[in-house]
């Protein structure tokens, strides 16, 4: 049966019947960041073939689609945030679209609908591109602006696994490429330059033209052209919800004083400093220009979690320039080179433009959000945009731009940074990575999760007419404690106890989502994932996939291959005949309570997903309040309730 179309209505998602819908799903998938089949960071590469790659086969070959999508349906998920990248669509050159890939992506969307999955498209990026340590933009963008990507490593302009990692060393972690270090690229020259041009070319380098357009227009129009290509191929599919704006965008040097080095919270930047080289915009521009600079280095204090000064580092000691031409920021009057040093000419170069102060939210994000809405709505006028900010800005409370486009969704991201960066979780000895405050019991951790997620949810006030809040990313690393669970699995352990910490962490996260009534797409499901510290999701040793081929022993069992399934496979109301007021699930007692205000004028039943995984011995169902008919179908993990009267309804599902 076709999925009923879902639309945004104020702060809610509602289906064609008028039922309130809860969207609960996953990101599909982590390896969509890299080409198929051998483009993962576990393979060495110099990126010389960047124009000739293919992403057909990501997130999985079509021959595997029914298996993976069927598993997601079995686990109760009803939405996927489907990853693609600018590079996947336009890797060959400006305006040269990979039509085979576009047809493939459209077919994945169609197949998802057959398996009960709504889809929204995420044009993903991390630290700009694969060539600068992440994913996203095609390599020819560097050539277009005059940067030589083959010099990035020699100039310390990018921190890239394929250039840092010793692939002959089979031991796992390596000091030359520390775990979760890829984010340091945001401060390095290649990233800072590309994001500054992408968001602020018109403001900061107005005379920098490419093919008759300002550099900002050239880059953004190529990106928007890729959204247009995907939108035109999937506009006819009723299960497609809309498009993300751009995953966790970087901000470049927008809003920073030219010589400012961020060593800790300040009036200029109230966020906590991050470990690594504390480069100012001027430091980075000097390095790109071929100058050697000495900069402070910060190291995290593991007792307080605070990044503290730990000496100096010489950057670009060989004096390698990454420019094939002159530097457009130097040409525009930001700085000048005198006596082998970069001297600032305008300290406020990235703060004031065209005679006024500028900020990334209103001068950068806002115009692009409106353009994304315009481009996709040429093909389907009802599509919302799923809007998100930069990762660090969201944590620091950066505002959404004003005004936001009509029909927008707050798609902010959230992670427990302690678990994510340290790859460890102990519910009796945890701490808040952002403040260092200790947490000695699960209740304290859950309460913080609720507070932090409520902060993401509060952004909805910036949206005209309200907006649903969907946490577009959250999740945990599965290689906690250097892959301790993998070692036990390899030794023959199959009991759920090996995943106890993973399950506990996820359970607290979903408890918080339930408490706030948030929609969500967990990061992530990677079909090619491996229980290998060098590989994981196939990208920079991240390993957050809820599925791994290495754990799949019975292909006929949809649970086989799942990791810590009880942490994420939870009961919830897919659709409510009325308006939801409360959800609470206690995994320890196997008890689910759902409260809602029933509306019998809605001609479709409330549908609750009741997974066998949480209720292995069966369950009883009790309905209190308004009169209702009950349809229990444990074989398909579903309970339906048709309210006959208006008024409050409480559904209690109790495991036996």
Image (tube, grey):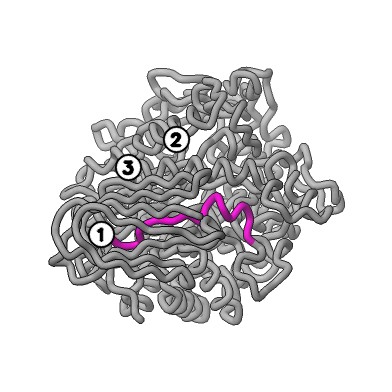
Classify residue 422 by image quadrant: top right
- Between the C-alphas of marks 1 and 3, the distance is 44 Å
Q: Pick whichever of labels 3 and 2 is earlier in the sequence.
A: 3
For label 3, the residue is 203
Indicate the position of residue 327 as horizontal and vertical percent values: 50, 43
Looking at the image, which is closer to me, 652 or 24?
A: 652
User: Start and end of the magenta stretch?
Assistant: 562-576
For label 1, the residue is 20
Residue shown at the point (45%, 27%) measured from the top left: 258
| Residue 560 position (above or below residue 564) | below
Q: Pick whichever of labels 2 and 1 is earlier in the sequence.
A: 1
Residue shown at the point (61%, 37%) measured from the top left: 421
Looking at the image, which is closer to me, 583 or 150?
A: 583
- Between the C-alphas of marks 2 and 1, the distance is 24 Å
Where disc 1 sits, the SS reads strand
| Residue 194 position (above or below residue 112) | above
Are the residues flagged by discs 2 and 1 in contact, CB closer than 8 Å? Answer: no
Tell me if residue 618 can be seen: yes
């Amino acid at each position: 049966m076709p999925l009923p179309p879902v639309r945004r209505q104020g702060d809610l998602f509602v289906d064609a019947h008028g039922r309130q819908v809860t969207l609960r799903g996953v990101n599909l998938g982590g390896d969509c960041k890299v080409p198929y089949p051998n483009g993962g960071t576990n393979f060495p590469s110099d990126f010389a073939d960047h124009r000739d790659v293919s992403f057909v086969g990501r997130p999985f070959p079509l021959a595997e689609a029914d298996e993976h999508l069927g598993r997601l349906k079995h686990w109760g998920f009803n939405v996927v945030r489907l990853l693609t990248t600018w590079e996947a669509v336009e890797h060959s050159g400006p305006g040269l679209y990979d039509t085979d890939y576009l047809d493939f992506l459209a077919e994945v969307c169609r197949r998802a609908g057959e398996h009960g999955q709504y889809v929204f498209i995420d044009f993903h990026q991390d630290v700009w591109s694969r060539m600068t340590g992440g994913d996203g933009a095609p390599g020819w963008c560097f050539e277009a602006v005059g940067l030589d990507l083959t010099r990035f490593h020699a100039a310390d302009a990018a921190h890239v696994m394929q250039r840092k990692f010793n692939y002959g060393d089979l031991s796992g972690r390596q000091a030359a490429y520390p775990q979760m270090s890829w984010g340091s690229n945001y401060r390095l020259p290649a990233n800072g330059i590309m994001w500054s041009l992408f968001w602020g070319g018109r403001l900061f380098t107005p005379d920098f033209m490419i093919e008759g357009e300002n550099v900002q227009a050239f880059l953004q129009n190529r990106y928007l052209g890729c959204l247009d290509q995907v939108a035109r191929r999937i506009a006819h599919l009723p299960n497609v919800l809309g498009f993300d704006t751009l995953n966790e965008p970087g901000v470049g040097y927008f809003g920073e004083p030219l010589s400012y080095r961020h060593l800790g919270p300040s009036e200029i930047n109230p966020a906590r400093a991050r470990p690594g080289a504390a480069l100012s915009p001027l430091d980075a521009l000097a390095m790109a220009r071929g100058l050697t600079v000495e900069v402070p280095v910060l190291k995290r204090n593991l007792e307080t979690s605070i990044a503290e000064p730990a000496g100096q580092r010489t950057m670009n000691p060989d004096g390698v320039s990454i420019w094939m031409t002159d530097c457009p920021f130097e040409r525009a009057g930001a700085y000048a080179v005198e006596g082998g040093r970069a001297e600032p000419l305008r300290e406020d170069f990235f703060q004031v433009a065209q005679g006024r102060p500028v900020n990334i939210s209103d001068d950068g994000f806002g115009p692009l959000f409106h353009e994304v809405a315009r481009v996709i709505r040429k093909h389907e006028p009802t599509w919302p945009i799923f809007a998100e900010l930069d990762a660090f800005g969201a944590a620091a409370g950066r505002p959404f731009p004003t005004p936001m486009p009509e029909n927008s969704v707050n798609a902010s991201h959230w992670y427990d940074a302690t678990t994510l960066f340290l790859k460890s979780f102990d519910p009796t000895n945890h701490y808040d990575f952002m403040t260092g405050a200790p947490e000695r019991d699960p209740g304290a951790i859950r309460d913080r999760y609720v507070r932090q997620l409520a902060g993401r949810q509060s952004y909805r006030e910036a949206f005209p007419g309200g907006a649903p809040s969907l946490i577009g990313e959250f999740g945990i690393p599965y290689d906690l404690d250097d892959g301790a669970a993998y070692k036990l699995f390899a030794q023959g352990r199959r009991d759920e106890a090996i995943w106890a910490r993973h399950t506990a962490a996820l359970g607290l996260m979903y408890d918080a989502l339930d408490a706030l009534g948030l929609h969500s797409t967990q990061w992530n499901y990677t079909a090619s994932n491996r229980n290998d510290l060098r590989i994981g999701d196939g990208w920079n040793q991240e390993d957050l996939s809820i599925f791994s081929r290495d754990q799949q022993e019975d292909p006929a069992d949809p649970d086989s291959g799942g990791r810590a399934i009880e942490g994420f496979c939870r009961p919830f109301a897919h659709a409510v005949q009325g308006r939801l007021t409360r959800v609470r699930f206690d995994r320890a007692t196997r008890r689910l309570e759902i409260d809602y205000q029933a509306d019998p004028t809605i001609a479709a039943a409330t549908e609750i997903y009741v997974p066998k995984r949480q209720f292995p011995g069966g369950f009883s169902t009790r309905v209190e309040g308004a009169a209702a008919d009950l349809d229990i179908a444990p074989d398909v993990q579903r309970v339906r309730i048709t309210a006959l009267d208006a008024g409050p309804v409480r559904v209690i599902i109790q495991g036996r």
